[in-house]
Image (cartoon, rainbow, N blue to C red):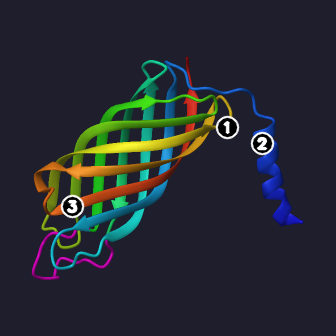
Amino acid sequence: MYRFIAPLAAVLALAFTREAGAVEQEHHLGVDLGLSILTISGPSSAPDVGPAFGLHYTYGITDQVNLIAGAQYSLVALNANATTPPTYTHPTNLFNADVGVAYVLDVLRWVPYFGGLAGAYVLDGGTIQGNLFLPGAQVVVGLDYLLTPVWSVGIEGSEHFLFTDMSLYTSFTNVVARVQFIWGR
């Protein structure tokens, strides 16, 4: 009996929602939960994989252009420690904060978007001695679904570029699920 309650509740919630659409001058505040993959060049070329947690804010400048800002924490390697020789390049933690713009392709309830952000990245723990601060940027692609005029869920993928060490940190990718609260007009 209980295994039918969750699917039935989801169907009813989606069937009886009011019309929703992305518009200008809306504010979005949300949380992200997903997966991070950091690839470091060198003899141990296996990517470091771990969870990612984040917060994001979006403001609709126009119907098609959004200002976006976000902060994220990624736990990229639990097995790296400061006594592992010979390199000092594998972080345990990766923090980033970015600001940018996204172009929104509003299709009533489904809202695909893509954009670019720039910001700061901090790598620490693991074999990193102290904190490593790097400038960086990211390209994002996502799809949100407007459940109601005030709630949306979605998925977002992003590729990050750590500018001063791009030959060392060859790829940093995030895939997250998102939940947002929307207000204003």
Q: Which amino acid does label 1 sit on?
A: Leu
Given residues 85 and 114, the one toward you in this image is 114
Which residue appears at 61% of the width and 39% of the height? Answer: 145
Q: Where is residue 79 in the image (x, y as percent from the top left)?
A: 30, 79
The span picked out in magenta is 77-91
Q: In this view, does 4 lie above or below 90?
A: above
Q: Position of residue 5 (x, y in %)?
A: 84, 58
* Crowd around label 3: few <14 · some 14–19 · many ≥20 (10 Å): some
Closest to the camera, between mark 3 and mark 1, is 3
Distance between the alpha carbons at the discs numbered 3 and 1 = 37 Å
Give whichever of discs 3 and 1 has the lower sequence position: 1
- In the picture, the quarter occupied by the C terminus is top right
Give whichever of discs 3 and 2 has the lower sequence position: 2
Q: Which amino acid does label 3 sit on?
A: Thr
Closest to the camera, between mark 3 and mark 2, is 3
- In the picture, the quarter occupied by the N terminus is bottom right
**Left or right of 60, for residue 1:** right
Q: Where is residue 143 in the image (x, y as percent from the top left)?
A: 52, 42
Q: What residue type is labelled 2?
A: Ala
Q: Are marks 1 and 2 in contact (CB under 8 Å)?
A: yes
Instruction: Identify the element where label 3 is drawn.
Output: strand
Total count of labels: 3
Which residue appears at 17% of the width and 69% of the height? Answer: 41
The circle on residue 147 is: 1
Residue topped by disc 3: 170
The circle on residue 13 is: 2
The circle on residue 81 is: none
